[in-house]
Structure formats: C-alpha cells, structure tokens
Amino acid sequence: QVQLVESGGGLVQPGGSLRLSCVASGSIFGVRDMAWYRLAPGNERELVASITGGLNTKYSDSVKGRFTISRDNVKNTTYLQMNTLKPEDTAVYYCNADIWAAVTGYRAYWGQGTQVTVSS
C-alpha cells in the first residue's frame, strides 16, 4: 500500500516560483534515492533533479541554478523548489522514489504527477 502523491503544481507567470511536494506513505521501512522527472507533450521524459539518502544532489542542465531538490526523511517527503520559471518548464512533474516496503528490498515507485504551467 505504498504510494507517492505529488502536490504544489499550478499556473504561474514566467519568472515566478512554485514548490512541489511528494509524500510517500504506507508501510515504509526505508527510502533511498528520490527524484523528480517531467514530461511535456512532444518531449522525452526528463530527469530534472535527484537526491540520495546522503543528500547528494544532481540537476539537469536546463534547471541548474534555478531549481533545488530537498528531502525530509521524517516525513518521507521530497520537495522541488522551482524559481525563475520559464515557459519551457511547463510539463507534468512526476516524483520517483526507491522505497523499501517488503522483505524483497527496495524498488522504484512513481507518483501520478502534478501539472506545472508557466505562461503569461
């Protein structure tokens, strides 16, 4: 019964900011890497940002310097702070997490996505 739920998406003007949240819930014993992906119509899925359990972060070149990924291990939550948003950032953003929820060990889970639209 593990699930990931994203929130925080919406409509914002260019140059604005949004903060996305992704909460993992259920019978969770551990969470390793967490990441944000995005998918825009006509585009390939893109890895936007990732964060390891040791708080090592990586960003795509397109968002580096504008986005910040973080996590709260107590709440089993990852955040994506998005600043200086551009129309090119418009996409559905998906949360991904490597979660230990069974004897079999860790495996990847996906959220259902949250829409981010950057437009004037």
Image (tube, rainbow, N blue to C red):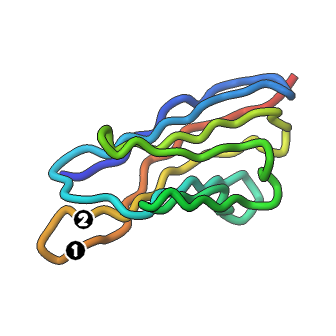
Residue behind mark 1 = 105
Q: In the image, residue 25 lies at what x, y percent?
A: 26, 44
Q: Is residue 63 above or below residue 9?
A: below
User: Is residue 70 left or right of 66 when viewed as pictured?
Assistant: left
User: Residue at the location (64% across, 36% down)?
Assistant: 81
Question: Looking at the image, which residue is at 41% across and 59% down?
Answer: 97
Count of numbered marks = 2
> Badge 1: how crowded within 10 Å, few (<14), some, or many (20+)?
few
Q: Nearer the viewer, residue 53 or 5?
A: 53
Identity of the residue drawn at 28% across and 71% down: 106
* Residue 27 image position (x, y, % from top left): 15, 51
Q: Considering the numbered disc 1 on the image, is that residue within a helix, a strand or a loop? A: loop
Q: What secondary structure is marked by label 2?
A: strand
- Return the x and y of residue 15 as percentages of the image width and height: 85, 27
Quadrant including the C terminus: top right
- Quarter of the view holding residue 12: top right
Q: Is residue 87 left or right of residue 77?
A: right
The residue lying toward the viewer, choosing from 13 and 82, is 82
Between residue 6 and residue 55, name the one nearer to us. Answer: 55
Q: Which residue is mark 2?
A: 100
